[in-house]
Image: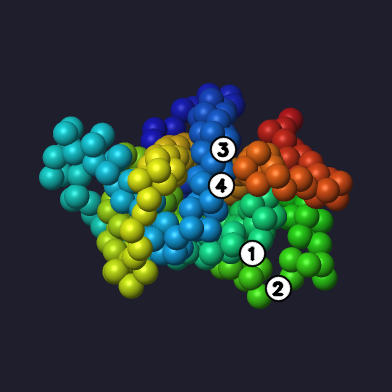
Amino acid sequence: MSAEGNAAAVRLGESEMPLSSRRDELAAIACVLVAVLFMAGHDALAKRLSAEYSVVMVVWFRYLVHFSVMAVGVLPIAGHRAFISPVLPLHFARGLCLVGLSLCFIFGLRFIPLGEATAVNFLSPLFVLALCAVFFGERIRPLQWGAVLLGLLGVLIIVRPGGGLFTPAILLPIGSAALLSVYQLLTRITGRTDAPAISNLMVGLSGLVFSSLLVPFFWSSPRIEDLYWVVGMGILGALAHILFAHAYRKTSPAFLAPFSYTQILFAAALGYLFYRHMPDGLAVLGMIMIGAGGLITLFRFK
């Protein structure tokens, strides 16, 4: 992406990092907010389907639909060139991360409510900040650390260490968070050479390949009426990843990390609509703190 040298441009990292205009940053924020809404919807449908079918089957269907949606949109334009990439191994690494985090998170939804599982999964922005500092040499500003740590404190209030959620099942969304942070940074690297549509076609293909190796051992025939939910889940996931890829091409994952916390709010709302699980007062306090962490970052230049 070309740098725009206007007064709103700021340096997001070291000398090799591009300058992002304020307009680019706001567009990236909007992409992330819509993407996490779609991901919350995807997770709500995945929780419903995982109660009826094996988690491996749910993940396989998710990537089958993802790849099909992207293929219909990309292949008529790009043809076979869509499968030619200088970073092809990284796309398959992204797909492996996505399959792993999907298995961990969706299996965890069998034991943990949607809102709470999503909150634990949002340890990933803290991992992203650390990885950006270590592997990309980015200078993480104190206000960025403060915003994400405020969100992390909100997560801890929701989870409540020592409470009923501290069972072995809590390791599943934590594992998902770790894999998600790696996926986000790999997406940033592949976004330097491949367009978002190509990037998401490849991750859909790689996710389908890896999940296809497992699904024969867990297969059961789905009911026709459940296929509507399967297709909806896959479409929401595909659209979310397109939006994430656009966002990471515009600015740093470190800057966007606090805004992704809003997925917890969406997940809590959908958890109530789908499953009648209402967060209590402390959980609401934690969600407000998470949202505040994202809002603080908006004013970091003032």
Confirm or deny contact between disc 1 and disc 2 (CB under 8 A): yes
State the image quarter where residue 220 is shown: bottom left
Mark sitting on residue 197: none
Q: Give the residue number, with chain letter if any, for mark 4.
A: 44
Q: How is the image coloured?
A: rainbow
Which of pointers 2 and 3 lies earlier in the amino acid sequence? Answer: 3
Q: Nearer the viewer, residue 235 or 197?
A: 235
Q: Is residue 278 above or below residue 218?
A: above
Q: Give the residue number, with chain letter if any, for mark 2.
A: 167
Q: Say what amino acid the circle numbered 1 marks.
A: Phe
Q: Position of residue 127 (x, y in %)?
A: 60, 61
Q: Position of residue 3 (x, y in %)?
A: 44, 32
Q: Position of residue 271 (x, y in %)?
A: 66, 45
Kindly state the secondary structure of the residue where label 3 is placed.
helix
Residue at 42% across / 57% down in the picture? Answer: 58
For label 4, count other residues whose C-alpha is less than 10 Å away and answer few (under 14), some (14-19) or many (20+).
Answer: many
Confirm or deny contact between disc 1 and disc 4 (CB under 8 A): no
How far is disc 4 from disc 3 in space, using C-alphas?
A: 11 Å
Q: Say what amino acid the circle numbered 4 marks.
A: Ala
Kindly state the secondary structure of the residue where label 1 is placed.
loop
Q: Is residue 225 above or below residue 212?
A: above
How far is disc 1 from disc 3 in space, using C-alphas?
A: 22 Å
Query: In the picture provided, is 181 more to the left or to the right than 121?
Result: left
Q: Position of residue 297 (x, y in %)?
A: 69, 39
Residue at 53% across / 58% down in the picture? Answer: 51
Mark sitting on residue 111: 1
Residue at 81% across / 56% down in the picture? Answer: 157
For label 3, count other residues whose C-alpha is less than 10 Å away and answer few (under 14), some (14-19) or many (20+).
Answer: many
Residue at 76% across / 45% down in the picture? Answer: 278
Q: Give the residue number, with chain letter if any, for mark 3.
A: 37
